[in-house]
Image: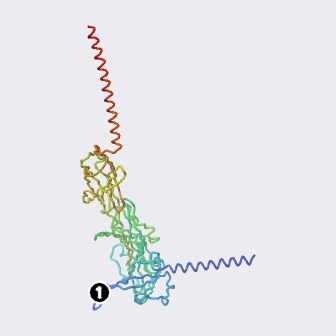
Amino acid sequence: MTNFSTIYKLSLVALTCFFQVLLVEASTGSCPVLECWFVQEKAGRGGGLTGATTQEKSLLHIQTDAQSHDAASQKTPADINPDRVYFVTDPAATLCHHSLNPPRGSIKKPQCEINPFLPQPSTLTWVASLTDSALSPIYLEAEWFSSAFQGLNEQLGISTITRAPTGSKEHNVILSVTSKTLSVKSRLGEPVLLDCGFWTDPSSPLSGSGFAVEWRYQFRGNGRVVVAYDGKRDRLADTQEEGATLDFEGLHEKGNASLILQEAKVRHSGTYICSVYLPYLLAQVALDLEIVEPPSLSIHPSPLPLAVPGQTLNILCEASGFAPLSLDLSWEFKGADGKSRPLGSGSVTGHRQTWDGTYSQSTRLELDTSKLDLGTGGEITCMAVHPGGTRRASATLNVIGFSTPSIEDSMAMVGVALVLYGLIKFVSWTFSSSGSDETDQQDKVNLLF
């Protein structure tokens, strides 16, 4: 019994070790090999920069541990220059997200671009404090790169700053900025969370010297700073926009730099750039926010007046309080038989913008009852198709004096006519009898006298 118990325990230990090995292999094997475009400015004659750029295919082998890279065993595709094959160590495993590692043979690929990066101090008020004290130039004397990644279906956006000893292909992630909300839609008045988080390599001397965060808004060439924070001095810039804030506790403890808009407004639609600064370093991700508010519909006059054959009715449908501009208005009629038919878009007006940034638009329908077979009436519906959803408004239309009655109506009218005829005959007979009796009585009186 003792031997059996011992064998059982050893078996459990062996199985545990086996599954641990499988988990380790699965975790290390989950990091992708990414095809990237290496983009850099082209050097002109005399060593100057002309502003033109070149791009080459490159390959990034991602791992969470530098010891797991085995450059000798890696095969380089024929269309990639071996000098553009890099081995990136990301201890935070940010680059090992499943959206960056599609199934083998997948047509869709994540997007990736890598550029040379030059560390330099920033002159921004909320960043300048990070480089007040002189840092050792030895650490900065290396090869630095800025990389941008976008996962499948815009699930994830990542920007990294990596460092490699001069002449080495071994890159270490020093700073990474991530967002899981590259495209956000919100209704008016709702709170909005724009996700942004960052990670710094704790072994880097730059990570212990403070950080700064900036959120900037851009739309059609115009931009403004929404909120800026000096993490070293724990100070907000005076440019903070009303209704915008950060989770400062989460910012320091977890690297949560997400922007919180307390109440969504039309003017918030646009591109937001989350920038995270370390001394001499900058990484940023861009997010798109769209405020989508469907229209409210109303029909005038309400209720609709009674219509007679040959009359033309003017009916107005007004759509209000919607954003963005895109809107399709149309009319339809549903008769007593339940069948619907389109009546077209009517006469549509241009857009009008209201004080809160939303839009309004209207359409006028001229309903000619002499040209349309409306029967005894039905339901008139105004329909608005908008990115925020389809909206409908209906009104009841009654047509009187209809010239072609139904079989049931005809039978009813015949019945009424017969009743009226019988009533008339009865009244006539009654009056005739009564007149006859009076004549006879008068004759008898005349004979007496």
Residue 223 placed where, x, y %?
30, 70
The residue furthest top is 449
**Where, quadrant-wise, is the C terminus in this rendering?**
top left
Q: Which secondary structure, mark 1? A: strand
Which of 191/235 is in front? 191
Residue 66 placed where, x, y %?
49, 84
Residue 13 placed where, x, y %?
65, 78
- Give the residue at mark 1: 49
Q: Amino acid at mark 1?
A: Leu
The residue furthest front is 447
Which of 343/305 is in front? 343
Q: Is residue 246 left or right of residue 43?
A: right
Label tally: 1
Snapshot colouring? rainbow
Question: Is disc 1 surrounded by few (<14), some (14 to 19) or many (20+) residues within 10 Å?
Answer: few
- Name above or below for residue 245 compared with residue 64: above
The residue furthest bottom is 46
- Name above or below for residue 98 compared with residue 260: below
Which of 425/56 is in front? 425
Q: Is residue 226 left or right of residue 348?
A: right
**Where, quadrant-wise, is the N terminus in this rendering?**
bottom right
Which of 407/109 is in front? 407
Answer with the quarter of the image where residue 179 lies. Answer: bottom left
Residue 40 placed where, x, y %?
34, 84
Answer with the quarter of the image where residue 46 lies. Answer: bottom left
- Name above or below for residue 158 compared with residue 308: below
Is residue 254 visible in the rendered structure shown here? Answer: yes
